[in-house]
Amino acid sequence: MTEALIFELSAPGRRGASLPEADLPMQNPSSYLPAGLLRKDAPELPETSEIDTVRHFTRLSRMNHGVDVGFYPLGSCTMKYNPKVNEEVAALPGFSAIHPYEPGELTQGALELMYRLEESLCEITGMKRFTLQPAAGAHGEYTGLLIIKAYHASRNEGTTRRKIVVPDSAHGTNPASAAVCGFDIVKVESNERGGVDLAALRKLMGPDIAGLMLTNPNTLGLFDENIAEIADIIHEAGGLLYYDGAN
Ligand SMILES: Cc1ncc(COP(=O)(O)O)c(C=O)c1O
């Protein structure tokens, strides 16, 4: 990389912005902060002019690879192509500038939009309920796995159904989320067409299976043509199917 570190661009005394002299008397922080919170040495911050700082970070940002500049093979959840009009609408200040603690009477428009989206998603998928709470892909996985866990616990199978099956093509967050939820992870191989190997899946089934985390289309960009059969196999074994989608 040819770009210098911001610390290498630093020169003692250089400032990004100069503020006028304060017209209030200066206070020593030790007069109002506990001793344990006071710094002994000044922080080692880079000293750069505004234009050097802006140019440095602009040059770095141009090195980013993303869907706007080329093919993006993984990270399809967060980084995938979203139509720009969607980005524009989501960034409208009426949505993006809402504070999490803003009172309900001031956020009726956003709440209505979220409610209607949930209703539409229920109608499209045939599900009874939807949640827009998870803030990212792995957060959604975590939510799904906690539901699987609660389901088995409600049937007094929480201690026996400990295994989550994860295909070898899965996003790395799948096994990580299952581990965070306290499950054991079992890998299922892919077949020569890039889908789940049905024979290998059947072999794994048993009373200890809690569920299968399936991404469809998967991370290879392939739609699993055996999805109905895969769902039957896992359901017949008493497990639940967590469903994600990539690409
Ligand atoms: C299919 C799939 N599942 C889960 C994730 C995890 O999503 P996030 O990075 O938003 O936590 C990704 C991320 O790219 C993904 O592509």
Image (cartoon, rainbow, N blue to C red):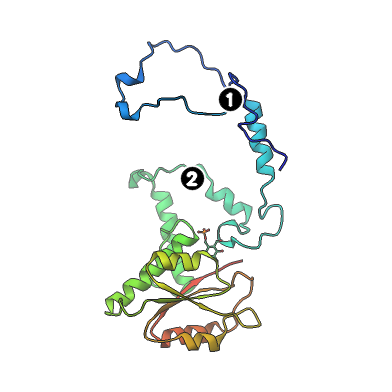
Residue positioned 40% across, 27% down in the render = 39
Residue positioned 42% across, 77% down in the render = 211
Residue positioned 37% across, 85% down in the render = 207
**Secondary structure found at label 2:** helix
**Secondary structure found at label 1:** loop
Q: Nearer the viewer, residue 99 or 189?
A: 189
Residue 247 lies, in percent from the top left, at: 61, 66
Residue carrying label 1: 47
Residue 137 lies, in percent from the top left, at: 49, 61
Residue positioned 39% across, 47% down in the render = 107
Q: Which amino acid does label 1 sit on?
A: Glu
Residue 191 lies, in percent from the top left, at: 62, 83
179 to 191, vertically: above or below:
above
Q: Which of 119 and 62 is in front in this view?
A: 62
177 to 107, vertically: above or below:
below
Residue 96 is labelled as 2
